[in-house]
Image: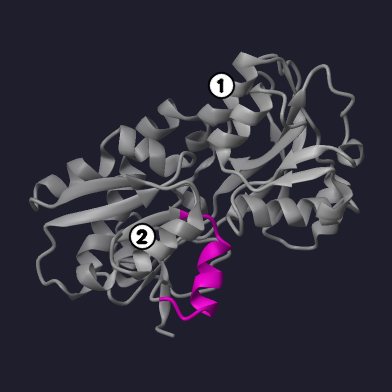
Amino acid sequence: MKRRGFLGLSVGGAIAALSPRAAAQTTIKEIRIGYQKTGVLVIARQQAVLEKRFAEKQVGIKWIEFTSGPPLLEAMSIGSVDLGAVGDTPPIFAQAANANVVYVAGSRITNGQGILVPTNSSIRTIADLKGKRISVGAPKSGTELNARAVLKAAGLSYKDFAKVEYLPFGESVELMKNRQLDVTLQSAGLGVSALRDLSVSMKIVVVEVPADIVAKVGDAAYQPTVIPANTYEGQTKDVQSIAIQNFLVTHEGVSADTVYKMTKALWENLDAIAAAHASGKTIKRENALKGMPLPLHPGAEKYYREVGLLK
């Protein structure tokens, strides 16, 4: 496996690496970015952050939507996607399967674990989920693997539920609206549109994930957090929850110039991202280099030296 290096920026999930096509080209004319419905990278797309940065080089940005991390990584492995925003876990499985995918960028970011149920449900705690119909996210997606970890820490397994659906955000929300599910468990940035839509369509309760359950996960990547009051319609109080750290990493095939420009563009447009999405307000450049298990990519290193985070 090639040496990997961190980009050290927080954009809403791990970004997987450039495909062989892009890495092999001397002059890149288009960067194809795979994304999902949640994450700060979605806001970067809405704000045209990368388009503005790469316009001067006459490099186009093409955005391709995926329902979850695994199909995105499959597309990347056959050269249909150059970059992709995914959670921290799917790329590990891709690497284990010898797929031609490695990380592009890395730093801390927290996605809250939202457990939403109808107000008229008897569910008020994680223990109350037993025997219910639940959606846990697409198979082997970051959301689904996080669901397994949280439920296990609470003493539950999928065998404890009447029905387990492996569905992405949109489909889970539709089944909730149609009363075909009792609960949906999703890892997402605060106030993700699909869950906000659900809270507007029906009265919901956000189920607490207490700090003692977070501790029982036994992984430092999972930390206690709070979903602020009014994040979702009808949520009048702060709710304790769990935040999941993701890392964005890169490989040596991505040019230093490309990585430098992406790092610079995202950090220097953080105000616009924060104004557009609550998750952006939790991202701090001074935390970009904390907890890195791998070396920095030379392009990212250049940027952090320029801004004084590296000496």
Find the distance from the CA under tag 1 to the CA under tag 2. 38 Å
Q: Nearer the viewer, residue 210 or 38?
A: 38
Q: Position of residue 295 (x, y in %)?
A: 44, 75
Q: Position of residue 129 (x, y in %)?
A: 86, 38
Left or right: where does residue 114 sit relative to residue 61?
right
Callout 2: 10 Å neighbours few (<14), some, many (20+)? many
Callout 1: 10 Å neighbours few (<14), some, many (20+)? some
* Quarter of the image with the C terminus in it: bottom left
The label number, if any, that marks residue 304 in the structure image: 2
Left or right: where does residue 184 sit relative to residue 252?
right
Task: Examine the image and state in which quarter residue 196 appears.
Answer: top right
Left or right: where does residue 218 sit relative to residue 57?
right
At x 21%, y 70%, the residue is: 21
The local secondary structure at tag 1 comes to: helix
Task: Examine the image and state in which quarter residue 309 appears.
Answer: bottom left
Q: Are marks 1 and 2 in contact (CB under 8 Å)?
A: no
* Quarter of the image with the N terminus in it: bottom left
Left or right: where does residue 208 sit relative to residue 5?
right
At x 83%, y 56%, the residue is: 152
Task: Examine the image and state in which quarter residue 93 appears.
Answer: bottom right
Mark 2: amino acid? Tyr
Mark 1: amino acid? Asp
Q: In the image, which residues are magenta?
A: 86-99
Q: Position of residue 158 (x, y in %)?
A: 81, 53
Question: Does the rendering let one see residue 27?
Answer: yes
The local secondary structure at tag 2 comes to: helix
The label number, if any, that marks residue 197 in the structure image: 1
- Above or below, 231 against 247 in this view is above
Residue 96 lies in the magenta stretch: yes
- Above or below, 267 against 133 in this view is below
Question: Does the rendering let one see residue 270?
Answer: no
